[in-house]
Amino acid sequence: MILTILEIILVVVLIGAALLAVWYRDLVAAVIASSVVSLMLSIIFYILQAPDVALTEAAIGVGLTTIIFMIAIRKTKRFEE
């Protein structure tokens, strides 16, 4: 029962962060929202007993991709026009 409530909360946060990533005009905020989506997916994978997939998603999705996007945004304009 409690695990089901936790899964529902994680999915709601995941969907909300995905919608925010699309909705934000500020690129840094969109990248952070995208990072939250990856983090929620990582937690969901761990709950579904796939720790190797969860670790990979956390390392690549949350860590590496966010860093690459932030470097690219820093080298270009921050706000979309």
Image (cartoon, rainbow, N blue to C red):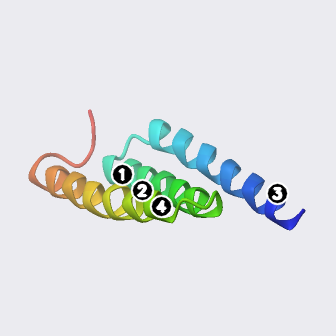
Of helix, strand and loop, which one carries label 3? helix
Of helix, strand and loop, which one carries label 2? helix
Q: Residue 67 has which mark?
A: none
28 and 66: which one is in front? 66
Identify residue type, mark 3: Thr
Label 1 crowd (10 A; few <14 / some 14-19 / many >=20): many
Q: Residue 31 has which mark?
A: 1
Instruction: Please count the marks in the image.
Output: 4
Mark earlier in primary sequence (4, 2): 2
Q: CA distance from mark 4 to mark 2?
A: 14 Å
Quadrant where the C terminus is found in the figure: top left
Identify residue type, mark 2: Ser
Q: Which residue is mark 3?
A: 4
Q: Position of residue 5 (x, y in %)?
A: 83, 59
Question: Vertical placement of 32 versus 19: above or below?
Answer: below
Q: CA distance from mark 3 to mark 2?
A: 23 Å
State if disc 2 and disc 1 touch (CB < 8 Å): yes
